[in-house]
Image (spheres, rainbow, N blue to C red):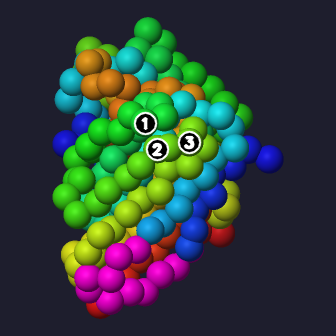
């Protein structure tokens, strides 16, 4: 089954404690991206990757890092989380950036 | 950078009625997509319409695109309670490296 898998689904952490949210896709897609969704603000792109070892900033990259060492994986790293990063995060993949995107189930992160 | 803006923000209708949601955008696009999101879950792709297309159908969904007005509409006919969800349009601006930019969504409530 074609899917994008994110882990964990829920995470509560404390300010400053590094964390990683994993994302994996099984569709051999070139393009992967991370979004955050906040009430009233819709989905905002954090980072995207057009291929292995190629990553670029989206609209809200501050406080986040990503890596794309393999085609299937695109982890999101918060080196020092802060409460304003409390949000619902989605990973997505597509063959190209503007083709049909497949979304993961989301990671609800709370930073206290 | 918000490209698409959906209208209305919220819509409440009775089962069996039609639901129309609109999306306006600012720059020239290659294509426009509509997605659906059930509460707190990942987005699901509904339909993609290219800039040289004016109308597209998929089951009970009808999408129109007017590039001269920079707007699109999504019509759901004979709505069902199961259609209750948020609906988002996403555009890729010409020259944007193909990244999708999402609007803030229309929250549709279909009452049985």
Question: Which circle's residue, 2 or 1, is located before the other in the chain?
Answer: 1
Question: Which circle's residue, 1 or 3, is located before the other in the chain?
Answer: 1
Indicate whether A94 appears above or below B82: above
Residue A49 at x, y percent in the picture: 41, 38
Q: CA distance from mark 2 to mark 1?
A: 5 Å
The span shown in magenta is: A9-19
Quarter placement of the N terminus of chain B: top left
Q: CA distance from mark 1 to mark 3?
A: 8 Å
Image-based side of B60 in relation to A19, left or right: right
Question: Marks 3 and 2: in contact by CB < 8 Å?
Answer: yes
Q: Is residue A63 visible?
A: yes
Image-based side of B7 in relation to A68, left or right: left
Q: CA distance from mark 2 to mark 3?
A: 6 Å
Nearer to us in this view, B63 or A13: A13
Q: Residue at x 49, y 50 (%)?
A: A74
Q: Is residue B76 visible?
A: no
Question: Marks 1 and 2: in contact by CB < 8 Å?
Answer: yes
Name the disc covering residue A68, or none. Answer: 2
Image-based side of B72 in relation to A40, left or right: right
Q: Residue at x 23, y 78 (%)?
A: A82
Circles 2 and 1 on the same chain: yes
Picture quarter containing residue B77? top right
Indicate whether B99 appears above or below B55: below
């Amino acid at each position: 089954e074609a899917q994008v898998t994110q882990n964990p689904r829920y995470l509560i952490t404390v300010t400053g404690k590094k964390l990683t949210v994993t994302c994996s896709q099984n569709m051999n897609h070139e393009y992967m991206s991370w979004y955050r969704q906040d009430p009233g603000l819709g989905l905002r792109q954090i980072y995207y990757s057009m291929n292995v070892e190629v990553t670029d900033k989206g609209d809200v990259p501050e406080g986040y890092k990503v890596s794309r060492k393999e085609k299937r994986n695109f982890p999101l790293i918060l080196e020092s989380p802060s409460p304003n990063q409390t949000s619902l995060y989605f990973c997505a993949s597509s063959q190209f950036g503007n083709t049909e995107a497949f979304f993961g189930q989301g990671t609800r992160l709370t930073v206290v | 950078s918000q490209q698409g803006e959906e209208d209305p923000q919220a819509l409440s209708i009775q089962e069996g009625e039609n639901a129309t949601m609109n999306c306006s955008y600012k720059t020239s696009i290659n294509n426009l997509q509509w997605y659906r999101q059930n509460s707190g879950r990942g987005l699901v792709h509904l339909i993609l319409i290219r800039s040289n297309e004016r109308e597209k159908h998929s089951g009970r969904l009808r999408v129109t695109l007017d590039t001269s007005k920079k707007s699109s509409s999504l019509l759901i006919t004979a709505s069902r309670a199961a259609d209750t969800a948020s609906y988002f349009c996403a555009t890729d601006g010409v020259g944007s490296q193909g990244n999708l930019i999402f609007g803030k969504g229309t929250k549709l409530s279909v009452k049985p």
